[in-house]
Image: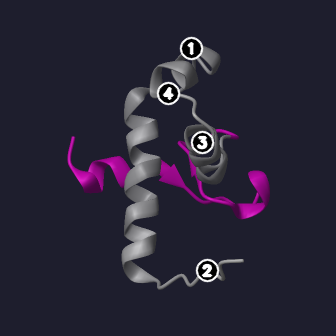
Amino acid sequence: MTNENLLSRITVDSEICHGKPCVRGLRYPVETILEYLAGGDSVEDLLAEFPDLEREDILACHEYSRKLLAAKSVHLTLA
């Protein structure tokens, strides 16, 4: 699956999750999927926990965040 095909899995609808980018119009915000992964859950963990997700959905979240970071500079203040 190409990166552009992956990105087609990410949708934005003002009626779903307050317009946050979500997976395939489901109520799984990209942000939440990335938080699970950052917290140590594996792709397999997510697929087992949320059976309506597909491996490509998680890859789409990665690709979406990669594109977003490539387009926007984010500066963090380290304490």
Label 2 sits on a secondary structure element that is loop
Direction left: furthest residue: 2
Label 1 sits on a secondary structure element that is helix
What residue type is disc 4 on?
Ser
Whether 23 is among the magenta residues is yes
Q: Residues within 10 Å of mark 4 (few under 14, many from 20)?
A: few
For the residues marked 3 and 1, what is the alpha-carbon distance in whole angstroms? 13 Å
Which of the labelled discs sits on residue 42, or is there none?
4
Q: Residues within 10 Å of mark 1 (few under 14, many from 20)?
A: few
Q: Position of residue 4 (x, y in %)?
A: 27, 56
In this orientation, does residue 8 appear?
A: no
Task: Identify the residue position indicated by label 3 in the image.
Answer: 33
What residue type is disc 1 on?
Ala
Q: Position of residue 78 (x, y in %)?
A: 65, 78
Circle 3 or circle 2, nearest the eye: 2
- Are the two marked residues, 4 and 1, in contact with CB atoms closer than 8 angstroms? no
Tell me the quarter of the picture where residue 40 sits: top right
Label 4 sits on a secondary structure element that is loop
What residue type is disc 2 on?
Leu
In this orientation, does residue 7 appear?
A: yes
Q: Residues within 10 Å of mark 3 (few under 14, many from 20)?
A: many
Part of the protein shown in magenta = 1-27
Task: Identify the residue position indicated by label 1 in the image.
Answer: 48
> Which mark is first along the chain, 2 or 3?
3
Q: Give left or right: position of 18 versus 30.
A: right
What residue type is disc 3 on?
Ile
Q: Position of residue 58 (x, y in %)?
A: 45, 38
> Which mark is first along the chain, 1 or 2?
1
> Which mark is first along the chain, 1 or 3?
3
Q: Quadrant of the C terminus?
A: bottom right
Q: Nearer the viewer, residue 35 or 4?
A: 35
Circle 4 or circle 3, nearest the eye: 4
